[in-house]
Image (spheres, rainbow, N blue to C red):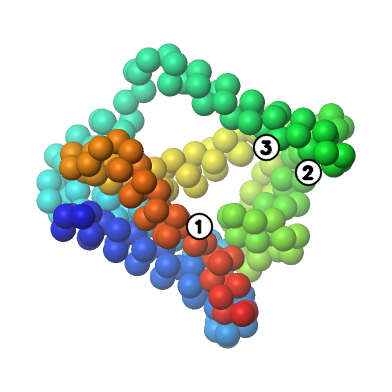
Amino acid sequence: MNKELRYFYLGAILISWCAWIPYGASQAGVLKVFIPWELVLMGQFGPSLAALLLIYQYNGKKGIQVFFQRVLKWRIHIKWYILPLIITPLISVSWLVFHRLIGDEIPSLQDFLQWPLAYSQDYGSGGPYTLQGDLVPNIGFVKFIKNLVLIHPIVASITFVLLTILTGPISEEFGWRGYMLPKLLSRYSMLKSSIILGLLWGFWHTGPDFWTFVFEA
């Protein structure tokens, strides 16, 4: 990797792990300091923040403007909208059918209709990646979301979509696919670039629960 990519990756890890590692140590009882769940959420923005900082460093405000014009481009071929809208539900249904075939119990329609309540009860109970059933330490954001999604199923749906966009595409994708992937593609093939990106992304993607496990081990 060239210098810019090394700086980006180190920056992404530094920002994210500086939030996740102390939180994991606190959850494991190793660090006797109150660390709220909101810090975990902020750490997830490491890749995108690292990318924006480097773009500004090397290209200034104009570089930031060009970057957002590229990554926020929505006028693309209709197939790139249709594919994810079809593939994601198809994968979900396929797994439900598989579990039914092997004798597992699967959610009923009534269970689905109760999802706003389940979403409120489980939201933030184990960090942004797991649902462990116990409310994690926080400074109010988790409680706010829990109350918000109980207002109405439509409000719950909108909240779910907005948080999904915020804690995935915006917090990570701007960095990985918006910044790192194009630079890899300028030097390597599509396959090699994807493998490199996947390995580096996976190593970064430890999350708070991984570090809790490390400190508890």
Say if 115 sits above or below 139 in the image.
above
Residue 28 drawn at (x, y percent): 62, 78
Q: Which quadrant holds the N terminus?
A: bottom left
Q: Residue at x 66, y 66 (%)?
A: 136
Residue 131 appears in which quarter of the rendering? Answer: bottom right
Which circle's residue, 2 or 3, is located before the other in the chain? Answer: 2
Q: Report the residue marked by disc 3.
A: 156
Q: Which mark is residue 8?
A: none
Q: Which quadrant holds the C terminus?
A: bottom right
Q: Which mark is residue 41?
A: 1
Badges 2 and 1: C-beta atoms under 8 Å apart?
A: no
Q: Residue at x 72, y 53 (%)?
A: 122
Q: Report the residue marked by disc 2.
A: 117
Indicate the secondary structure of the residue bearing disc 3: helix
Residue 100 appears in which quarter of the rendering? Answer: top right
Which circle's residue, 1 or 3, is located before the other in the chain? Answer: 1
Residue 12 drawn at (x, y percent): 34, 59
Cα–Cα span, label 2 and label 3: 9 Å
Q: Is residue 10 visible?
A: yes
Say if 105 sits above or below 40 in the image.
above
Indicate the secondary structure of the residue bearing disc 1: helix
Q: Mark 3: which amino acid?
A: Ala
Residue 105 drawn at (x, y percent): 86, 40
Which circle's residue, 2 or 1, is located before the other in the chain? Answer: 1
Q: Mark 1: which amino acid?
A: Leu
Cα–Cα span, label 1 and label 3: 19 Å
In the image: residue 25, left or right of residue 135: left
